[in-house]
Amino acid sequence: MDIIVKKDYEQMSKCAAEYIATLINKKPNCVIGFATGRTPIGTYRELIRMHNEGLDFSNVIAFNLDEYYGLGMDLSKPYALDQSYQRFMYEELFKYINIKDENIHIPDGLTSNPDEFCMAYEETIKEVGGIDLQILGIGGDGHWAFNEPGASLDSRTRVEKLSKETLDDNYEAFYKKAGFSRDEMPHYAITMGIGTILDSRSVLMLANGSKKAKIVADALEGPVTNQVTASAIQLHKGKATVILDEDAASMLGRYKQSTSVS
């Protein structure tokens, strides 16, 4: 596992974008798994800047980690009132780059048959040859995507009930600002499983801020446990890279001496 520590969120985001751009330039038809949430927004803005300077996404294939069950993109609504992850990706990245619509795969939160959809999503990933790079954040309780504490480490794409901590975090980050009540939030999501994520040839995990320091240390240096599903990064058999800002890295122990800091 490679751990890279940057001074702040801006430098972390630039480093992550450069990492992703290197893959795209090396393999223009690469398959990238994208993440939502606050953490990757800076990275996506940097990728947009790179695209405006020539970075070509026309052959990139995208798979999103997750989507709220019961939500789908509605462009007739203001951005703040459409909290779907499909809308998030559209507004934060996809509408600004030249990725093809047919190459974008996002879980269908409006599917009438979620079990069938989830199996088909797994098959589609296999059909394109698997994911080359999966971008990841880490939740406050250590979850990856919507794989909540207790999720199986060999799980696959499925519907998952959201934990109270996840609901609280997302309410404060998104729904409260948009004027929604807690009862109006989706309580379930479609998510890639931990097993699906670990099948990716490489993973790139991002975290910033002092609030993430303890859980980052638990995930990277603590025991592998399904109570901290991001700890599964220690099981990844390909290339695992973690990019942190100094605050998120502040509680690292044994990795700190070998960490690249710049």
Image (cartoon, helix red, strand yellow):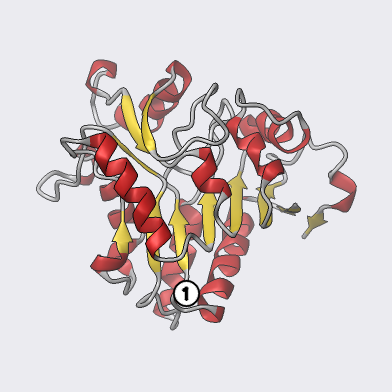
Task: Please identify the residue farthest to the left as the structure is shown.
Answer: 76
Instruction: State the image quarter where residue 255 is shown.
Output: top right
Residue 5 in the image, given as x and y percentages of width and height? 73, 52
Say which of 230 and 42 sits in front: 230
Q: Taking 224 as reference, is 202 above or below it?
A: below
Secondary element at image label 1? helix
Residue located at (45% from left, 56% from top): 33
Asked if one can make out residue 60 in the rendered structure from this viewpoint, the answer is yes
Numbered disc total: 1
In x, y percent, where is residue 54?
43, 83
Say few, some or many: other residues with alpha carbon within 10 Å of mark 1 (under 14 / 14 to 19 / 20 or more).
Answer: some
Query: How far from the left and from the top, in percent, is residue 70?
Result: 21, 32
Question: Residue at 21% of width from left, 40% of height from top?
Answer: 82
Residue at 60 percent across and 54 percent down: it is 204
Amino acid on which the number 1 mark rests in the picture: Met
Q: Is residue 22 above or below residue 239?
A: below
For residue 171, above or below residue 24: above
Q: Is residue 242 left or right of residue 49?
A: right
Would residue 83 be seen by someone viewing this image from the given angle?
Answer: no
Seen from the viewer's position, the closer of residues 172 and 220 is 220
Q: Position of residue 43 (x, y in %)?
A: 50, 58
Q: Residue at x 41, y 68 (%)?
A: 48
Q: Nearer the viewer, residue 161 or 180?
A: 161
Q: Which residue is mark 1?
A: 50
Q: Quadrant of residue 189?
A: top left
Say which of 76 and 254 sits in front: 254
Q: Which quarter of the figure has residue 116?
A: top left
Quadrant into which the C terminus falls: bottom right
